[in-house]
Structure formats: structure tokens, C-alpha cells
Amino acid sequence: MKTYTTFSLLLFLFFSLISTQILFGQLGFCGGNSGDPIFTETFGTGTDRGPALPTGITSYFYTTGVPADGDYTISSNTNFYDWHNTTDHTPGDTNGKSFIVNAHFTAGEFYRRTVSGLCENTSYEFSSWLINLQSPNGFCENGGLPINVRFQIWDSTDTTLLASGDTGNVMSQATPVWEQYGLVFRTVPGQTSVILKMINNGNGGCGNDLGIDDIVFKSCGDFISVRNDTNESSITSCEDLGAISTTLTATPDFSIFNTHAYQWQESNDAINWTDIVGATNPTYTTPLINTTTYFRAKVSEDAINISNNLCNVVSETFSLHIIPIPIAPVSNGDISNCQGEASGLSVSVPDGVSVNWYDAPIGGNLIQPNSTFFQTETAGNYYAEAISELGACISPTRTLVTAIFHPLPVLNNESLTFCEDENINLSADITNANYLWSTGETTLNISANTPGTYSVVVTNTNGCSNEKTITLEQIDRPILKSIRSDGPSIIIQTENIGDFEYALNFGAYQTSPIFDAVLGGSYIITIRERNFCGEINEPYIHLVIPKFFTPNGDGFYDTFRPEGIPNNIPYSLSIYDRYGTLILNSRDSLFGWDGFFNGRKLPASDYWYTIIVENNMYKGHFSLKR
């Protein structure tokens, strides 16, 4: 059993505490401003695999095929196993590649890279993007093993750990997601290079498959804001207001640097920067500016490093935008539409310019903001004004665009009637136009003889169309069903119903089909439709046959005598008793029966008759009353 002195135990606890704090440090990013990247690894582009990483960077085996556990490849896709098939992370590249790793069965280091050219006593930010390639719907149980990577920054002797942090378990996700991780570290005096290590904290197996891309090192310094003397972070001014100048102040937050050296820079594109000679103070007053210009300050802790971009950082950018006055919008043409149709007026402007619509060339009312398109159903002149999205600079003039609305053909729907078996003329009403009837005809007028609904689309010379509807109803001609006599009345019945009227012997018409108190005789019965849609003239012999007679000698109804049999028309009349015995028969003579048979009075009773006139038979009965 070993024994420790008190001093040895204290040393052990001290270094254990330091080691624990370092090994279990937190990931994080620079809280201030960063400089331009001093090291970048994107793993290249192309559709072919590889090339393999240089010797010493990884102990994993390189393959151009499917990477097994402990293998890696460099590829522009991840179409392996049941993994997500996704692209690399680097923005804007084509067929960009990434570092594809299938974790070894034994946890441990899988990437090591020396980064040189650093400045001593300077803070830096390391960052990298990682992705879990395993799909949760794949073959692996519970979505597979998570990925878990430790990043370490060591000094160039590989004996002093400068920073360390773990990603923790990164589980598989339904869609592939690249995530960024970072570390902040500081070089010590005399140190100009460091070693980056990536360690797999988990063993390989089903899962723990990852992609790595965009490894970047940047200097890290204070957060440095830039404001002008009115506390603005940018200025936007219209060109017609003339050149402007402002005084800028760079203000560090002292989160990293204890002292500060400055070098102001300017740019016309915010990409390429030029040092401003003599501008080395925290404040800088610009000259008069009449074109868009950007300003920033390079800042380092020591003046000797101000010109070394590996050691300095850059402030926020102050933009001084001088916005050109936009030209008036370009009209896409006046619009000529039909009444009731919305007109879409439009103009064209360059990118970065919007359009406001007015009802007057100067002043007037704003009727449509922020659109190159204006829709209206009202004829008139409309005016489009260009306005820059930056600075709200207004075009010196407005562009006239006119909307014209042509009237539609004026059509009136109709409801018409026509007589059965006749044609009726249907008209679209308007000449000098194009026509399309629901029947397929294309003429101004068409002929119809079938009831129903007809329509016609009329298109005038301006190309404007309207529709007319005609409802057509047929009027049927009268069809005679029967004419019969009921005592002195004549009753007419038709097969159909209509607006019919009736007349006897071409006399006055009546709407009732019953004629009362008509003397017996020959008549012409006329039935006509009141709209002149058909007429029937039917000859009829009206026989008025008494319903009873009283042969008592008082001079009233003493004989049974039918009325109305024409003298010149053959006829016969027979009378029977209730037992069918023929009592008398008369032919072609003026007949009247007095109630006697073979010289004796017949008793009061009902008797039957049969009358034949021109092959028409009339039957009935009457009463003899005593």
C-alpha cells in the first residue's frame, strides 16, 4: 500500500482539479468581434471521392467505397447504408465535400491537425460543423448510437491543453441537420501554433456515424461597436441631398483586450477593405461622401499586431449608403379591358426599388403602396412612382398608365311564346357583332320550334361579350274531345288545357265551353286559341230532347218531341219501354208522341229512345208524367 505526504496529496488534488476543469470545459463561441478566418478546411469539391487526408491527420482507414466501422471517406454525398443522404455544409459551393466518419468500435482520437501562424498572447475561436448521419427510421434500434465528439486545443508541444469541450450526445433526427460547435482559447507567450484534436467519446456500432465540415480558426477580441456622433450605426441618404460627412467612434467592451490599437478601414463593397492612412484613433471623421461607403476599425491589443490580420479583430461595420434617385417606373403598357373585368396595370423597376400608385401626376392620393401591380375596375389615368427600398428616395416623375373599359353589349333577356308546329324567330338584338348560340349557330337570328331555354353570347367589335337568355314556351292548339247536348245546353270538352274561346255559327266568342238555352238545330262549333295558335270548326246537330212530358191536354208539354233535327237530313227515332218493348218507330217525319200505344194510354214511367241522325246515334231516356 502506497503512502503520500501531505504536500504530495495537495499537489495531486490541485492538478486533478485543474485537469478536471480543462477536460470538462464548455463549448462556446467568441463573445466579441472576430477577425478574418486564418485557417479554413472545407474538404474540397467534386463528384469523385477523396483525396485521402494527409498522413498523420487521422488513424482511420481511408476508403473510396462504403466506410465500415473505423473507416472514413471524403465525399460530396452521404448515400451509404440507411443514412441520410445529404450535401455538405459549406454555403455556395457545388458538389462540396465533407469528412465522413464511421466511428471505430473503440472510442478515441480520429482527427489531428496543426494550425500555424498564430500570434502569441492572442485569443482565438475554433469552430466546426457536425451532423449525425443516422436516420431514426433506419436499421438501428432506437435510432442508433448517438454521436459524441470532444474537441481539444493543445499547444504545439502537445503537452499543454488550452481548451476542451464535448458536444454531448447528438441523437439522430428525422431530417439531417448540420450543427456548429466552437471553442475559445488563448495563446501563451512564444506560442504561434496549436494542435486541434477530435476525439470520439463513444464506441462504434450501429450508429455513431457523422459528417464534419467547415473547420475555421479566427482571432477573437472585444466586441467593438461603431456609432457616429448621433448614436447611429448606419446612415442612409438620398443622392439628391448631396455629399455628407460624419464622425465615427469605435467602442470596445474590454471583454478580451486590456489595451487597444486602432486602424480605420474603408470599402465600397464591404468585402475588399483598404486602410485609411493616419486613421489610428478611436474616432474618425469621414470626408464628404457622395457614394456608398463602408467603414470599420481593425483593433488589436498591441500596436505591433494591428497590421497582422492573424492577430487583430474587426469592429462592427458602419455603412454610409448614398442611394441613387430611382428613375420613373417603366410602363408595361396601357390596359384596355371590358367593363366589369379587373385591369391589372403594371410597371417595371430595378431590384431594390418599390412602387407607389397615385391618382395624380403630382400630389394626389396614394391608392396602392409597395407594388409594381395595380388592379382596378375603374377607367382612368393612374400614376406609378418609384421609391428606393433603402432611403425611400423618390423618382423625380411618375409614370402614367391608363385603364380603359369598353362597354358590354346591352342585351335584354326575353320570355317568348310560339304556336305549336310553327317556327319562331329568335334574335340577338345587336348587329355588327359575333354570335354564339347555345344551339351552336353563329348568326344574328335563329329559328326555333322547340320549347326550352336558349342563350346567345354576343361579342362586340371591342371583344367584349355579354349573354342573353330567351325562355321559349309553346302554345298548344286546341284538340276537341267531345261535344254533347244536355237539354238546351251545348257542352264542349277539349283534350288539352289552354287559353281557349268558343263560338256558335261564327258568332260572338265566349270563354265558357258551355252554351245555355240553345235551340235545337245544326250548328258550327268553333274552338280557337286566343293567341291565334289554332282553330277548330266542327259541325254539330244540337238535339234538344225533353226530359219529360205531361200528356194531360193543358197545352203544355203534351207531346214528346225532340228539337233540332234538320228537315233535310235522314233520321230515325225509336221509343222503348222499360222492358225493351218497341213502342213506336218513326223515320224522316216530324214526330211527336202523345203517350198512347195501340190506342191506349201508357202509364207514367221512364221510357228510352234511340235517335240516329246521319249515322250518329243518340240514346237516352225521358219520363212520362200523368
Image: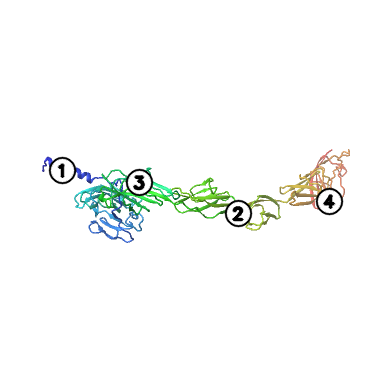
Q: Earlier in the sequence, mark 1 or mark 4?
A: 1
- Disc 3 from disc 1: Cα separation: 53 Å
Q: Residues within 10 Å of mark 4 (few under 14, many from 20)?
A: some
- Disc 4 from disc 3: Cα separation: 136 Å
The residue identified by callout 1 is 12
Residues at badges 3 and 1 in contact (C-beta under 8 Å)? no
Q: Nearer the viewer, mark 4 or mark 3?
A: 3
Q: Earlier in the sequence, mark 2 or mark 3?
A: 3
Q: Residue 173 or 594: which is nearer the viewer?
A: 173
The residue identified by callout 3 is 248
Q: Which mark is residue 571?
A: 4
- Disc 2 from disc 4: Cα separation: 75 Å
Q: Amino acid at mark 4?
A: Tyr
Q: Amino acid at mark 2?
A: Cys
Q: Earlier in the sequence, mark 1 or mark 2?
A: 1
Task: Determine whether 60 is above or below 259 in the image.
Answer: below
Residue 174 seen anywhere in this rendered image of the structure:
no
The residue identified by callout 2 is 464
Q: Nearer the viewer, mark 3 or mark 1?
A: 3
Q: Residue 564 or 351: which is nearer the viewer?
A: 351
Q: Amino acid at mark 3?
A: Leu
Mark 1: secondary structure: helix
Tell me the residue at 76%/51% (across/down). 535
Q: Nearer the viewer, mark 2 or mark 4?
A: 2
